[in-house]
Every structure is written in C-alpha cells, then in structure tokens.
Image (tube, grey):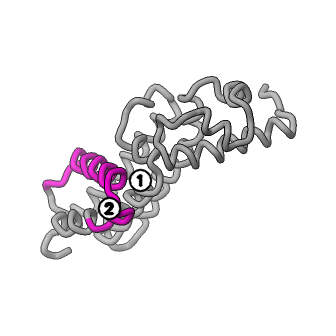
Amino acid sequence: MATRLRADARRNRAALLAAAREVFAEQGLDASLDEIARRAGVGNATLYRRFPSRRHLIAEVFASHMTAAVHLAEQALEHPDPWAAFVGYLTRVCELQATDRGLAELLVTTAFDDDERLAGLRIAAQRRAVDVLLRAQRAGRLRSDFTRDDLGLLMMANAGVAQHSADPHAWRRQLTLVIGGLGTRSA
C-alpha cells in the first residue's frame, strides 16, 4: 500500500515537479538538480528524498509529455485528411521540441528506455506516429520513400535547430521547407 504524503510533502513534491519541468525545458536533461531544488524552494535533501536519482525525476516529469505525444498521434489519426493530419502532427511535435529542450532530448535518445513507463510510452508514441505516416502514404499524399527512420532524423534535426539557432522560430521555417519536400504532387 502506498503511503500518503503529508500536506507539506505533497506541496514540496508538486513544487519540485513544476521546477523540474521548467528547468529541464530551459536547460535540457543535464540541468542542475541544485537549480531545480532552489527554484522549488526546497533543499537538496528534500529533492533526493522524493526522487532518489535524476532518472526518477526525469521519468516522473516526462511521462506526461510522452503521453501527450501519444495523444497527438491519436488525434491526427482521427483527422479526416491524412495529409493535413500528418503535417499537423509533425508541426505540433516539432513545436513541443522547440519549446522544451528536455523533451527534445528525450525524444531522440534511448538512454531512458530502461524505465518501463517511459519506454512503453516511447514505443506507443512511435507506433502511432508511424500509423500517421503510413496513412498519409496510403492516401498518396506523402512520399512513399519516407520512413520511420526518416521521421526520427527529422526529429533530431528539429531538436538541433531549436537548440542552436538564435531565432526561436527557425524550426518553423526548417519544418516548412522539409514538409514541402515530403508531399507528393497531390499534396
């Protein structure tokens, strides 16, 4: 049976998660845990009592993000136009990467696949993304030679553009150019 946290412990945990989301989004997965504790207004000991390692904290913070990625693909599969669904899905995922450095890093690494929850969500997100891709191809709107691996490379490229460009919107231009090359004539 899980133990119930005291009210102050619940507040500290919530503050740590909020601070971690913020700091990981700004600085990436290697962000300082001291900075997270400082922004949460708690000591390092409190952070480690709630999250024994960086991996535990990352898993807790990003499980909801990965769940959101699965939902984005599922929403795209419900869209009546396969090409618009593909473009919308790709745009939204790239936007999430551009605004959250930690998520951008998580989407292109397998370093956390030993966490069952994150690994399961990653697999589900990838499967659904491939379903979106295949649906656009079956409709004759997406190049037939675009593969799951290409989608992964596109995510890596987007993460790099978002992280290294001085223009916070450079990823949009890059994505627009890529999408222009992915469509068939009917797209």
Q: Is residue 15 left or right of residue 130?
A: right
Q: Of the numbered discs in the image, which one, if any, rests on residue 97?
A: 1
Whether residue 54 is visible here, answered yes or no, is yes
Residue on which the image places disc 2: 171
Question: Mark 1: few, some, or many residues within 10 Å (few <14, many ≥20)?
Answer: many
Identify residue type, mark 2: Trp
Q: Is residue 176 above or below residue 3?
A: below
User: SS for tag 2?
Assistant: helix
Residue 49 position, x and y percent, is 72, 25
Total count of labels: 2
Residue 7 position, x and y percent, is 86, 40
**Marks 2 and 1 in Cβ contact (< 8 Å):** yes
User: SS for tag 1?
Assistant: helix
Tell me the quadrant of the picture where the N terminus can be found: top right
Span shown in magenta: 145-173
User: In front: 40, or 100?
Assistant: 40
Q: Which sits earlier in the primary sequence, circle 2 or circle 1?
A: 1
